[in-house]
């Protein structure tokens, strides 16, 4: 199961997340409404701080094609996007993860989907909808939204996603990660996997 620590805003937090066992890190870019939005130079610095064996993801809510091109130029391993840009706008070397929320069908022009109505606000996922997406999808399904060290084990056992994604649930304050919470979150996921 893939674990992504999202909303990373510093090199130190990125390195800590990886050292604690995260498979992927996520940064927010070209999403001015997000409190965790980072300028391109900071995204590059964070990506450089982690090894190539870590999945480097950019989360964007942009609706501007030029901004999407700027995101692609940062050379992430994957782009998690809310707006339905055509897949062909993203180079084939970059995975496209589509954000979906309750009531939406699973798109067929992506490499994975993430069930997330929260968008970094800590709003809890809908179990019934998440399970229905997992049953219907032909691509990996990642789960986000209100996950914490205390509830992620139950989410893993109930929804059986291919991965989990957390931002707010492992923070000390907005954009600042709490390493003890990251450790507890990863431990809870790994323990739930073996049950």
Image: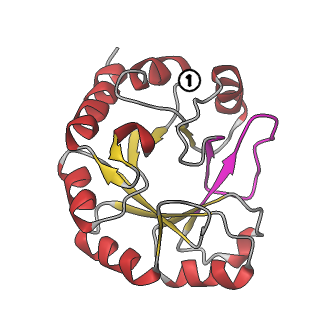
Q: Residue furthest front?
A: 173
> Which residue corresponds to the image point at 23% horizontal and 45% vertical from the top-left?
21
Specify the segment rendered in magenta.
96-117
Is residue 104 inside the magenta stretch? yes
Q: Residue furthest top?
A: 195
Mark 1 crowdedness (10 Å alpha carbons): few <14, some 14-19, many ≥20: many
Is 89 drawn above or below residue 9 in the view shown?
below
Q: Position of residue 161 (x, y in %)?
A: 52, 32
Residue at x 56% of width, y 23% of height: 159
Q: Which is nearer the eye, 9 or 69? A: 9
Q: Is residue 80 magenta?
A: no
| Residue 26 place in picture, x, y as percent | 43, 58
Percent x, y of residue 115: 63, 40
Query: Is residue 183 found left or right of 47 in the rendered image?
Result: left
Q: In the rendered image, which quarter contains the C terminus?
A: top left
In the image: residue 94, left or right of residue 41: right
Q: Please name the residue shown 53% across and 39% down the image.
A: 144
The residue where tag 1 is placed is: 159
Determine whether, in the image, residue 140 is placed left or right of residue 189: right
Q: Quadrant of residue 135?
A: top right
Q: Position of residue 121 (x, y in %)?
A: 55, 43
Q: Secondary structure at mark 1?
A: helix
Residue 63 versus residue 130 in the image, above or below: below
Q: In which quadrant of the rendered image does the N terminus lie?
A: top left
Identify the residue at horizontal 58%, vertical 73% (top origin). Answer: 30
């Amino acid at each position: 199961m893939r674990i992504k620590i999202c909303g990373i805003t510093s090199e130190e937090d990125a390195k800590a997340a990886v050292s604690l066992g995260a498979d992927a890190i996520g940064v927010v870019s070209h999403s001015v409404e997000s409190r965790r939005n980072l300028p391109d130079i900071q995204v590059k610095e964070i990506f450089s701080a982690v090894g190539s064996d870590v999945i480097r993801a950019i989360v964007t809510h942009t609706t501007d094609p030029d901004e999407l091109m700027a995101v692609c130029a940062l050379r992430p391993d994957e782009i998690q996007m809310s707006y339905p840009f055509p897949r062909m706008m993203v180079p084939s070397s970059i995975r496209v993860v589509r954000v979906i929320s309750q009531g939406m069908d699973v798109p067929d022009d992506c490499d994975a989907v993430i069930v997330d109505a929260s968008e970094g606000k800590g709003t809890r996922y809908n179990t019934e909808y998440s399970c229905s997406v997992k049953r219907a999808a032909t691509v990996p399904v990642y789960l986000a939204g209100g996950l914490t060290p205390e509830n992620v084990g139950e989410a893993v056992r109930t929804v059986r996603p291919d991965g989990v994604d957390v931002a707010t649930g492992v923070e000390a304050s907005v954009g600042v990660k709490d390493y003890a919470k990251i450790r507890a979150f990863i431990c809870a996921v790994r323990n739930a996997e073996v049950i």
